[in-house]
Amino acid sequence: PKTGHHQANRLVNYYLVNYLVNYLVHYLVNWNRRFLRLFLLKTKREKKEEREEEEEYYLVH
């Protein structure tokens, strides 16, 4: 009976570890997605400003 109990414990541990890993991966992916979105928005905004400056330059000259 002891070995069976031990196996059950191992299974529970396995599921817990699995759950934690999945949770962490999910969390990291969500966080990275948010970070990437912010980063992309930032770079897009900067490019937009550069383009507007160029247009102003062409209008003036």
Image (tube, rainbow, N blue to C red):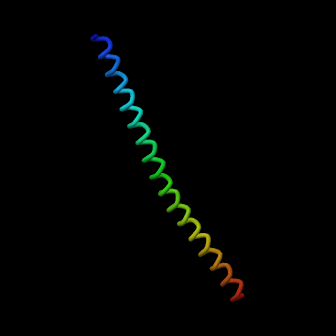
**On-image quarter of the N terminus:** top left
Outermost residue, bottom direction?
60
What residue sits 50% from the left and 54% below the top?
33
Q: In the image, is 61 to the left or to the right of 36?
A: right
Q: How many marks?
A: 0
Outermost residue, left direction?
2
What residue sits 59% from the left and 67% below the top?
44
Outermost residue, front direction?
1
Q: Nearer the viewer, residue 58 or 34?
A: 34
What residue sits 42% from the left and 47% below the top?
27
What residue sits 42% from the left and 37% below the top?
21
Q: Nearer the viewer, residue 20 or 6?
A: 6
Point out residue 16 in the picture as x, y percentages from the top left corner. Answer: 36, 32
Q: Is residue 29 above or below residue 5?
A: below
Point out residue 7 in the picture as x, y percentages from the top left corner. Answer: 35, 17
Q: Is residue 26 above or below residue 50?
A: above
Point out residue 24 in the picture as x, y percentages from the top left corner. Answer: 41, 42
Q: Quadrant of residue 18?
A: top left
Point out residue 8 in the picture as x, y percentages from the top left corner. Answer: 33, 20
Q: Quadrant of residue 26?
A: top left
Q: Nearer the viewer, residue 61 or 31?
A: 31
Q: In the image, is 39 to the left or to the right of 3?
A: right
**On-image quarter of the C terminus:** bottom right
Q: Is residue 27 above or below residue 43?
A: above
Q: In the image, is 13 to the left or to the right of 29?
A: left
